[in-house]
Amino acid sequence: MTEDAETDTALVCSAKGCTATATVALLWNNPKLHTADRRKTWLACDAHTRTLGDFLAARGFLRETAPADGT
Ligand SMILES: [Zn+2]
């Protein structure tokens, strides 16, 4: 199998239709769906960090932001 090919794939923004490289990871949790320690991750490019972050923050879901490639 060729799963190694995936490792070269750039981190891509999670915004609908956006194929830009993500720079920020938005870590969020929906208390209605997830246990408190669960984190969902959305990746965001520079253009969408604000819109995706605001979307999550407005719903009270946003927990943390981190560099997209942070390990
Ligand atoms: Zn984007």
Image (cartoon, helix red, strand yellow):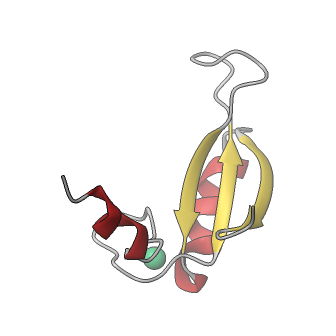
Q: What is the tally of numbered marks visible in this picture?
A: 0
User: Which quarter of the image is occupied by the C terminus?
Assistant: bottom right
Instruction: Indicate left or right for 34 with 48 as reference.
Output: right
Q: Residue at x 29, y 69 (%)?
A: 5
Q: Position of residue 66 (x, y in %)?
A: 77, 63
Q: Residue shown at 21%/59% (left/top)?
A: 2
User: Residue 43's image quarter?
Assistant: bottom right
Residue lying furthest left: 1
Left or right of 37? Residue 1 is: left
Residue drawn at 55 percent across, 54 percent down: 42
Q: Quadrant of ligand 1?
A: bottom left
Please report the residue visible at 33 percent of the width from the left and 78 percent of the height from the top. Answer: 19
Residue 58 vertical placement versus 59 (above, below): below
* Residue 16, x across and y down, in percent: 33, 63
In this rendering, position of residue 33 left or right of residue 58? left
| Outermost residue to the front | 1
x and y percent of residue 45 in the render? Answer: 54, 79
Q: Residue 30: image x %, image y %?
A: 64, 28
- Quarter location, residue 18: bottom left
Viewer-side residue, 59 vs 43: 43
Give the quadrant of residue 53. Answer: bottom right
Q: Is residue 17 above or below residue 71?
A: below
Q: Is residue 4 above or below residue 40?
A: below
